[in-house]
Image: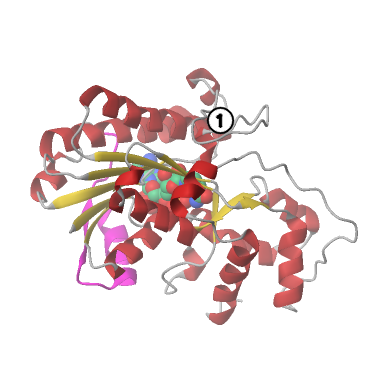
Amino acid sequence: STVFVTGANGFIAQNLVSKLLEKGHKVIGQVRSGEKGTQLAKIVNNENFSYVVVPVIEAKNAFDKPLKDHPEVETFYHTASPVRFSDEDVENQTLIPAINGTKYVLQSIKDYAPQLKHFVYTSSAGALVDFNNLSIVNEESWSPITYEQAKGSGVGAYVGSKKFAEQEVWKFRDEYKPKFSVVTVLPSFVLGPNAYVADLKNLTSTGATFSKYINAKTREELEDMLQFPSGVDIRDVVNAHVFAAENELANGKRLVCHSGTYNADLVLTILNEKFPGKTNLKPSEQSSSQVPDVIDNKATKALLGEFISIEQSITDAIDQLVKNGVF
Ligand code: NDP
C-alpha cells in the first residue's frame, strides 16, 4: 500500500522510509525544498519512493494538495517537527511549526483523505518526563510543562512542542472519532546505525551523535554531549512505527520506545574495548554515576518485545562509521 511520511529526510524518517520500502510499500515523502527532495531521492534510490515539497507545514491547508493528488495513501506518518534547542524565537520556530503543523495536517487528512487507515505521530519521551522532578513515568504520563514555561527556553520549547503537538493528535481523535487508527510513538534519545550509508557524515539530529563521541577530546566535552543519556535504538523506533500501522492492538496507544540510560563510561568502555585507537580517553576507574532511569514502558514492551540494549546500539553505530571509512 501507499504510505506518506512528513519530514522524510530526517534521521528517524529516512530509516523508516528504508524499512517501508523493504516491506514493499510505495512511499511518498514530504520535504521542505526541491533540493532536499533530490538529495533524499538519490540516497534512497528506489523507484517506489517519490517526494512532494511542502515548504511550510504549519500553514493551514498546506497538505490539501498532496493529499488530493494521492488518494491512494493508506498510512500517514507525521514525523516532521523542529528538533532545535535554540533559545531564539522559540514560539515561531519551535512551538508553532510543531503544534500547528500537526493540527493542520490532521485537518487536511479529515478534508481530503477519507480513505486513510492509519495515522501515526512521532512524539517524544520528552512529552512524558517531568525534568524538574524525576519521578517514574509511563505510557499515561504527561510532562507538566505549560505553554508559558515552554516559551521560556529552547529546551522547554522543544519539550512543549512535542507535548502540545501530541495533545492535538488526541484532541482530534476524541473530537472527530476518525475511522483511521491513531497511534503515537514516543522515543527517548535515538541511537544506532543508519539505514543508508551514502551520507553518514551528514546525518542530522541524534544520528550525528557517535561522530561527536568519537571526536571528543576531553571527558568534559563528552559529558556535555550526554545531556539526555536515555536512549533507544533507531531500529526499534522504526519497528514501533511499522507496528503502529500494522497491528490493531496499537490503535489508541502511546508506544514509548526506550531501552535504558547510559553514561560517558559506557561510551568510553565500548570505544576502548571494541575500537582500540579511536579515542585517547579512558573510562574512569571508579564506577561512575548513572542518571536514574525514570521511564517505565512495560506496557509498550508487552506489545513490541524487549528493546535492543544501549551497548549494542552504540557498538553498531560506531561499527558502521568505522566500516564505512568515516573513522
Ligand atoms: P531530524 O532533525 O533529523 O529531522 C527532522 C525533520 O523535521 C526533518 O525532515 C526536518 O526538515 C523537519 N523539520 C524541522 N523543522 C521543521 C519545520 N519548522 N517545519 C517543517 N519541517 C521541519 O530529527 P529526527 O529524525 O531526530 O526527528 C524526527 C522526529 O522524531 C521529530 O518529530 C522529533 O521530535 C522526534 N524525536 C526524535 C528523537 C531523537 O532522539 N532523534 C527522540 C524523540 C522524538 P528539514 O531537513 O527541512 O529541516
- Does 9 sit above or below residue 211? above
Viewer-side residue, 210 vs 90: 210
Q: Is residue 62 left or right of residue 220?
A: left
Provide residue 219's location: percent of width, then percent of height: 79, 57
Residue at 27% over, 60% down: 37
Is residue 199 found inside the magenta-colored segment of the image? Answer: no
**Element type at marker 1?**
helix
Provide residue 100's location: percent of width, then percent of height: 32, 30
Provide residue 145's location: percent of width, then percent of height: 54, 23
Q: Is residue 224 left or right of residue 289?
A: left
Residue to which mark 1 is pinned: 156
Residue density around tag 1, few if under 14, some if 14–19, many if 20 or more, within 10 Å? many
Is residue 57 found inside the magenta-colored segment of the image? Answer: yes
Provide residue 303's location: percent of width, then percent of height: 44, 49
Viewer-side residue, 122 vs 304: 304
- How many numbered circles are shown? 1
Q: Quadrant of residue 198?
A: bottom left
Viewer-side residue, 257 vs 68: 257
Does the image show residue 61? no
- Does 85 sit above or below residue 69? above
Colour option used = secondary structure
Residue at 29% over, 50% down: 245
**Image: magenta residue range:** 31-59
Q: Quadrant of the N terminus?
A: bottom left
Residue at 25% over, 72% down: 46
Label 1 amino acid?
Gly
Does the image show residue 45? yes
Disc 1 C-beta below 8 A from ligand 1? no
